[in-house]
Image (cartoon, grey):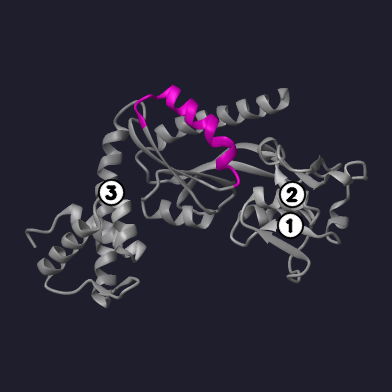
Amino acid sequence: MQNLTLKQLRYFEALSLHGHFGRAADVCSISQPALSMQIKELEETLGTRLFERSARQVRLTHFGEEFLSRVQAILRAVEELDDLARASRAQLIGRLRLGIIPTVAPYLLPTLIGQLTQANASLDIHIRETLTQKLLQELAEGRLDTAIVALPVSEPSLTEVPLFSEDFVLVRPQADAAKPVPSRESLREMRLLLLEEGHCFRDQALSFCSLQAVSPRELLDGSSLSTLVQMVGAGIGVTLIPEMAVAVETRSAAVSIARFSGLQPSRTIGMIWRKTSPLAKQLAQIAEVVRGSAAALRSHHAQA
């Protein structure tokens, strides 16, 4: 085992996660032949096969599955050593692996990246945009330092820091602009467009409308807020979007915006990280920058 290297373990983990030599090679920023050679040498060192190879994909052997769990533990331990070194500094320096949900990323990131860079020019920011459950998994596995999500996530192993709250607004066709704003009870009778399953924003919208189980014909799903708004502009139905998305998503669609009276649908956005992270103090500083970026974004929208 003396020839086994951390580089090989990282390549092995990437191939295990992606199940494809080309995609794994791209993630590792090496050529596919170089990745194949490293995996072959690893298998020769171990004296057994790690993968079953086919024309379209590769999958782990039984030994490969057991080996993966040990490899991930080793790689996470190495990451923690790096975190420990970074935590010894007053400011977070080097790589910041930041996850963020899709219903926040396009609207907050332009302001946030600018402010993070201004506050700490040495920060190397890596962004991962995906759904909450995937972010939670990658946080637990040590592949992310922190994530911006809708709270609560109610994971005992994670620290949750609320950053800001925002209301949801109703988006309907331009022709309906003069009509009374429907109540949430009335929304149940309308063709409501929502994000596809897996988005926490979908669950929040359904909760506001008190909708739990509905037939497929009553709701139409979209993959992004932009798609939903364009569908509304085409007269297909109505939708809800977070307030931070209004300026971006409605500028090129024939839609009108309405705010609900009485109880406002809303969400709380916050940052989460592992309670065991050595970077907790530095991540709390990052959270303050995120909070300031959100405030700057709201101020800009209010003046527009």
Residue 221: quadrant of the picture: bottom right
Horizontal side of residue 277 vs 301, given as left or right: left
Q: Amino acid at mark 1?
A: Leu
Q: Give neighbour class at mark 2: few <14, some 14-19, many 20+ (Cα, 10 Å).
A: many
Q: Are marks 3 and 2 in contact (CB under 8 Å)?
A: no
Report if residue 38 lies within the magenta region.
Answer: no
Q: Amino acid at mark 3?
A: Ser
Q: Give residue 117's position: percent from left, percent from top.
A: 43, 26
The structure residue drawn at horizontal position 19% and vertical position 52%, both measured from the top left corner, is 7
Question: How many angstroms separate mark 2 from mark 1 (CA)?
Answer: 8 Å
Q: Is residue 61 above or below residue 304?
A: below
- Which comes before the other along the chain, label 3 or label 1? 3
- Specify the quadrant that holds the C terminus: top right
Question: How many angstroms separate mark 3 from mark 1 (CA)?
Answer: 39 Å
- Which comes before the other along the chain, label 2 or label 1? 1
Q: Give neighbour class at mark 1: few <14, some 14-19, many 20+ (Cα, 10 Å).
A: many
Comparing 137 with 46, the one in front is 46
Residue 29: image tag: 3
Question: How many angstroms separate mark 3 from mark 2 (CA)?
Answer: 40 Å
Horizontal side of residue 66 vs 191, given as left or right: left
In this rendering, which labeled residue sits more in front, label 3 or label 1?
A: 3
User: What's drawn in magenta, residue-wise?
Assistant: 103-123
Q: Give residue 104's position: percent from left, percent from top.
A: 59, 42
Report if residue 113 lies within the magenta region.
Answer: yes
Q: Main secondary structure of the magenta part?
A: helix
In this rendering, which labeled residue sits more in front, label 3 or label 2?
A: 3
Residue 240: image tag: 2
Q: Which residue is mark 1?
A: 193
Element under disc 3: loop
Q: Give residue 136's position: percent from left, percent from top.
A: 47, 54
